[in-house]
Amino acid sequence: MMKRSVSIALAMILTIGLCSGMLSSGTAYAATGNENRQLVIDYLGLMETDEPIAENNTDVVTRAQFAQILYTLYMDGDSDVEDIGYSSYPDVKSSYWASGYIYYVTKADLMNGYLSGYFKPDEPITLLEAAKACLTLLGYTDSSVTSTSTGVISMYKKTGLNDNLSLAAKDDLTESDCMTLLYNLLKSEKTNGSLYGETFDCTLDDNDEIDYEALVTSSEDSYELDGPVMVTSDWEEEIPFAIDSAIVYLNGELSTSDSINEYDVVYYCEDVNTIFAYNAKAVGVVESISPNALNPSTITIGGKSYTLGSEDAIDEVSVGGSVEVGDAVTIILDADNSVLTLLTEDEYNIEYFGVISGVSSTTDGVYLSVQDLDGNTNEIAYDGLASDYEEGDYVVISYTDNEVNLRLMEYVSSFANKFTMELSRKV
């Protein structure tokens, strides 16, 4: 395996900035709203219409196109429609491409014709018309809400359908506006309290956004996910599509291929050209192998037990393997937080910079919780007093001959002030 040597000075620069974000409210790589919205809507196919909507984000969505979108939503994702065989409006002939969609959505009271008796299928859909339809899908059928434009716009805002939209009631919906509205609909609660997006296997992440990773990998109709693949010099050869053009998630957050580092773990979905990468690791001295080295299933590092999740990991700690109790190792964790492999001092430069996030005394001794460059928290067994360190201390941790070395970093405030702004520009 390849060795990775990280300059401790560089680690200081990056980690001070990164930890400053962690201790406040920032995240290193966050999905932008537009990116996540487009991924979710494209994956669900909610804006696929028989007469395609122009994808330059400026062309408006017609009433006919929106009728098909509503039909797909109303039919829980099924866009097939029967030929009704007659004209539902004077300007919607039976041969018109959207006649079936228009018939069914007007019958469901999701859209209506005008007082003139015409539907005007090729006219743009307005925000007011689209918002009323979305509210109906959410279960708001009370005439006090949907019978007046004031009631519709008021509830449209109250339900959060207006997130990231700044449109007046009579404004036309562009392709981008429509995508945002549909995304907001998926995130909204129905009148019965359930998430509207549950119909399409959508769930919300910790930021109350649609969890695209869970949608792609965990839904009833999810695509097959391959992996894990550990990132080494030739890892890209195992991915059946171009890395540079792939959609990349790192630890559940939308990111880029540049954020994937050596010894990260990746899974991939060829159907949607998406990579899900994880950089979860733990560093420390192996305290126990259970139940024994003849038939190992778990190891304990820093007072925490980890399940051995691969044949490689099991072989490493078995009798005759390269790792035994007392060895300092870095364990690489997969998406299930199981051990994919173990790296010894000879294979990996076990030296990193971190911030102490907790100090605890147990019957087994003192443990320091240290947050590292990747945001992982390592439990370090410390042969000293709990009062030697406190939360917020910056330390350098290294291992020599399987013994832990800790060094308190002083004067870190000047480094933090200097580099936090530079880091924010990079990420």
Image (cartoon, rainbow, N blue to C red):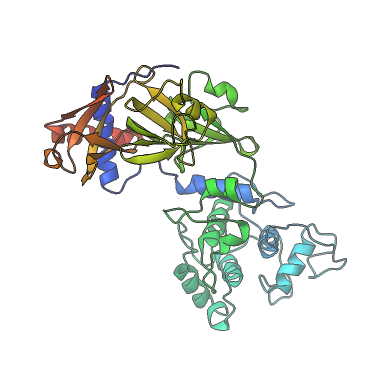
Tell me the quarter of the image containing the N terminus.
top left
Between residues 7 and 167, which one lies in front from this camera angle? Answer: 7
Tell me the quarter of the image containing the C terminus.
top left
Identity of the residue drawn at 21% across and 28% down: 396
Residue 42 lies, with reference to residue 97, above or below; the image says above
Q: Position of residue 195 (x, y in %)?
A: 53, 64
Between residues 386 and 135, which one lies in front from this camera angle? Answer: 386
Residue 298 lies, with reference to residue 161, above or below; the image says above
Q: Position of residue 212 (x, y in %)?
A: 53, 48
- Could you tell me how many numbered marks the image carries? 0
Q: Residue furthest right?
A: 85
Q: Is residue 237 left or right of residue 63?
A: left
Identity of the residue drawn at 55% across and 35% down: 267
Could you tell me if residue 303 is visible in this image? yes
Identity of the residue drawn at 52% across and 74% down: 152
Between residues 282 and 206, which one lies in front from this camera angle? Answer: 282
